[in-house]
Image (cartoon, grey):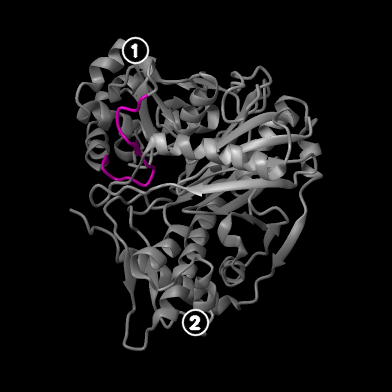
Amino acid sequence: MKYIAAIDQGTTSTRCMLFNHPGEVVSVDQKEHEQIYPQPGWVEHDPLEIWERTQEVIQGAIKKANIHPSEIGAVGITNQRETTLVWDRKTGKPYYNAIVWQDTRTKDICDELASDASTSSTTGSDQDRFRPQTGLPLATYFSGPKIKWMLENVAGLRAVAERGDAIFGNIDTWLIWNLTGAHVTDVTNASRTLLMNIKTLDWDDEILGIFGIPRGMLPKIVPSSDPGTWGATASGGPFGASIPVCGDLGDQQAALVGQTCFSLGEAKNTYGTGCFMLLNTGTQIIPSESGLLTTLGYQFGTQPAVYALEGSIAITGALVQWLRDNLGIIKSAPEVEELANSVQDNGGIYFVPAFSGLFAPYWRSDARGAIVGMTRYINKGHIARATLEASAYQTREVLDAMQQDSGVELQTLKVDGGMVANELLMQFQADILGVPVVRPQIAETTALGAAYAAGLAVGFWDNPDDLRSNWQVDKTWEPEMDAGTRARLYQGWKKAVTRTFDWLE
């Protein structure tokens, strides 16, 4: 075994990366896929296109590395979480497009379930009626309401689901099924469905009954790193060899592993399409009182599951793409930094990107995006700067909630994802948090975490300490902003956020 392969299936693209034992990238191939918007608030992907792109990037990465597939010891999967699809067990044909995590079509379902809390014996009520079992609020974000929507709106689907022919999976399950034929998901992805009991690590029959979802649709829940493996790739498949598939993590949990946040109190923040901060809480389940998610961090083999608090932000990097694709203010995403640097500050404006409502810590599906504080003075440089600052302000809100829930005062924040190449954003992030921000040498830690999970399962790496030795600092940003300015700017952000509430009736 010389290499471990990681398939990183994200919201806008799919890539395959090969890693060596020091955790270095040997090769990478990446392809984008179509974003489908049937109507306002709806976001879909074509599952067959995603599988096609996955096969292409696997072959591309192997070709670029100029290696024989037999040198790959294992395959790990990481994926956009909550994105939901249902397909035919016999033919592999999807019954409907994948409904993406950003999609808000299930708002009425969530509202109805929240108002009908009296039908359940669960403690709590309204939006938090399932928090005791799942750690999650009732929100359009999660897979369960999307499955319910499909069962109620795709003609004939409920009948075939109850017959056992229609099966569900998030994208990890879809890829593993196509690669190996196994119908599985790991504890981290299962914890994002609103259907798994985070104490038992099994599907919750009471919640399934309330949602009207047949248990037979659901995949088997397995550890994130599983020495038993779930199967192997077919020698006639895209890898061209039989390779065990034995690592599976939702993308944000994969980044937690890739950042080697294995100790209690360690945290990372990933800047991608959305922004996601996770804090390792060890084997302890910490209920959030501040609008965060209690979720699974990872589970290695037969070891106890490790939990995390998570702050999920729907729109960060996607806002830069919006400037590029919808407004044409920039031609490529990296140009946003140069444009933002053309002005000294944001000119007094704030951009609250509540395109899909607000996630943590508000969970307001009635919110919609707004730019506030506009004057004739404002130009596209100010809009670019406010776009970047929005990611930093939202991260500050999540960090405040995290510290309130956990009692842990964060000393440094490990960061990763595509946006950490943006120097202006990283410096502003350190300034608005008041703590150092640290970027590792390998910033794309999501794929690395999936590789680590697979490599641990087959003995390519011995233990988490082996992985820690690979982690190296690339750059640290120290806070430079004075406390008064920090407080004034943040107060303006909080005021701007309130202007987005109650936009939808």
Q: Magenta-highlighted stretch: main secondary structure?
A: loop
In-image side of 447 versus 504 (left or right): right
Q: Is residue 349 above or below residue 472?
A: below
Magenta segment: does it hold 101?
yes
Residue that label 1 marks: 164
Task: Residue at 56%, 26% (x, y): give it.
Answer: 237
Task: Residue at 21%, 21% (x, y): give it.
Answer: 156
Q: Is residue 377 above or below residue 335?
A: below
Please tell me in which quadrant of the rendered image residue 76 appears. top right
Q: Is the residue marked by circle 1 packed among few (<14), some (14-19), or many (20+) residues within 10 Å?
A: some
Magenta segment: does it hold 495?
no
Q: Amino acid at mark 1?
A: Gly
Task: Residue at 38%, 69% (x, y): give it.
Answer: 351
Where's residue 163, x and y in %?
29, 11
Q: Is residue 161 above or below residue 49?
A: above
Q: Nearer the viewer, residue 10 or 101?
A: 10
Q: Is the residue marked by circle 2 packed among few (<14), some (14-19), or many (20+) residues within 10 Å?
A: some
Q: Residue furthest bottom?
A: 377
Where's residue 399, x and y in %?
54, 56
Where's residue 489, x and y in %?
47, 75
Where's residue 482, x and y in %?
60, 78
Q: Amino acid at mark 2?
A: Asp
Please tell me in which quadrant of the rendered image residue 434 appears. bottom right
Label 2, label 1: how far apart the Cα atoms are: 58 Å
In-image side of 107 versus 23 (left or right): left
Q: What range of the chain is rendered magenta?
A: 93-106
Q: Secondary structure at mark 1?
A: loop
Earlier along the polypeptide chain: callout 2 or callout 1? 1
The answer to whether mark 2 and mark 1 are in CB contact below 8 A is no
Residue that label 2 marks: 345
Q: Quadrant of the N terminus?
A: top right
